[in-house]
Amino acid sequence: MYIFRVFRLVLFILILSYFLGTFWYIITKHTTNHDAEMREFTFYNEYDLESKSDWQNLIIVVYFAFTTLSTVGFGDYNPKSEIERIVTTFILLVGVACFSYIMGQFIDILMNLQNVTADNEDSENLSKWLGLLAHFNRSSPLPKEMTKRFERYFEYYWANDKNYAIKSQIDVRFMTELPNHIQTDIYRRFLFADFIYLFKIHFRMQKENSQRIERPDLDTSFYGWEDTQYSQFMISMLQNLEPRFYSAQEYIFEEDDEVNEQIYVISQRSAKQKEKSGKYCIGFSDQKQRYFHVKLGKKTIIGGYENLFGYKSEYFYKALHHIDAYGLRKENLKPIMDKYPEFKAQISSYMVNFYYRIIKKPMLEFKRNILSQVRKRQDMDQIIKEVDEKIRLAEEQYHEEMNKSYEQDTSKNDETHRNVQKLENKVNNLAKSVHDLFAQFDELSKRVEPPNHSPTKSNK
């Protein structure tokens, strides 16, 4: 866009110089008397335009017009006659006006370009901060992976922070001087239009009966942007949103994490990538195994219930694909909720309803099924261990009895024969008990039903 604006200004200067040069050529040619015996002292005669080609004359007059418009005036080409000086005076007046406009446009382009690339200054400050951290780490630089994560986070933050346009003192002054309805429209229709559309149900606030106005042409049972209290509440919320992103397979919250912000999941990917963006799953852990069940996507809020009521995270939240989001910190949310208690009650109700219906209830049912299956498997494992232990003891006892039998005096054949028979009986009894145990194991295996869900497992 900026290249096109610069090109348009340059083209305007060239066209203006061409037409003024052509006008100057016509003036100086027609004010020169070609039939006079004495050669007149004019621009046309002085620079011998008559003997030059049209192309050469075009270059001369356009160059003269350009240097005159820019008020540079090198002096290599200048008016000679009185009439030419009068015309040049008017050209200079036009030139001052035109170049003032052109320079104003150039300055505007440069200022806008400077605002767009202002994150370069932030990048320099970030580099200084990283250098300061290295200084206090005995001059050892931070690990490259950590540095890359810092840079990636802040680059994304600066590129997607919509409140950046009104953070400086000058920007805030301009904003506060605008009428209230224009300030509201800037947030509602320009900066956060997409966000408001995605979470319109979350921010749909119902009025109390005493505040409703009976108008058949309007639905007055809910607050609208025309309501001052509601618009101020919404602007306060929007002013505290901060960009967030999570890579695929990255954990957003772990179990028992302190939840200090709530994450509004949006989608900013291209049309081809939207189907695979903003997805995340929720799970729990049991004995170093992780099980994931509930899958959600954009238009949902992660950690809203925990952040609002000050609870720790009960479950894991893991990004399945790239997630673009906005975060709202607890320390920024609390003053807003305290200032607008009516809206706090409705948002709290929404958060509780969403958390228990969409997250906690399905997760508890899933967790119960998974744990019951795990317990049955553990019972079977215990039976197998008991059988293996009895077999091992039986073998040890068998070998011990055999050794004792053969160590006895060979002359006592009858007693040896009786000992062998006793030992055989013990082995037969043991085999019968092992057979019974395996039958019990098979019966338990038949009772175990296949799981209703196919849980995703991952080693912690």
Image (cartoon, rainbow, N blue to C red):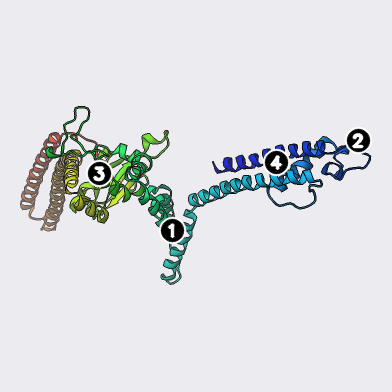
Q: Where residue 62 appears, x then y in whole percent?
A: 74, 41
The crowd level at tag 3 (other Cα within 10 Å; few <14, some 14-19, many 20+) is some
- Disc number placed over residue 35 in the picture, else none: 2
Q: List the single residue furthest toward the right.
A: 37
Of the numbered discs 2 and 4, the one sitting upstream in the chain is: 4
Of the numbered discs 1 and 2, the one sitting upstream in the chain is: 2
Which residue was labeled with disc 3? 228
Alpha carbon distance from label 2 to label 3: 83 Å
The crowd level at tag 4 (other Cα within 10 Å; few <14, some 14-19, many 20+) is many
Q: Amino acid at mark 2?
A: Asp
**What is the number of callouts on the image?**
4
Q: List the single residue furthest toward the bottom.
A: 138
Of the numbered discs 1 and 3, the one sitting upstream in the chain is: 1
The crowd level at tag 2 (other Cα within 10 Å; few <14, some 14-19, many 20+) is few
Q: Amino acid at mark 1?
A: Thr
Nearer to me, 144 or 420? 144
- Disc number placed over residue 147 in the picture, else none: 1
Q: Amino acid at mark 3?
A: Thr
Disc 2, SS: loop
**Which of labels 1 and 2 is toward the front?**
2
**Which of labels 2 and 4 is toward the front?**
2
Alpha carbon distance from label 1 to label 4: 53 Å
Q: List the single residue furthest toward the top.
A: 216
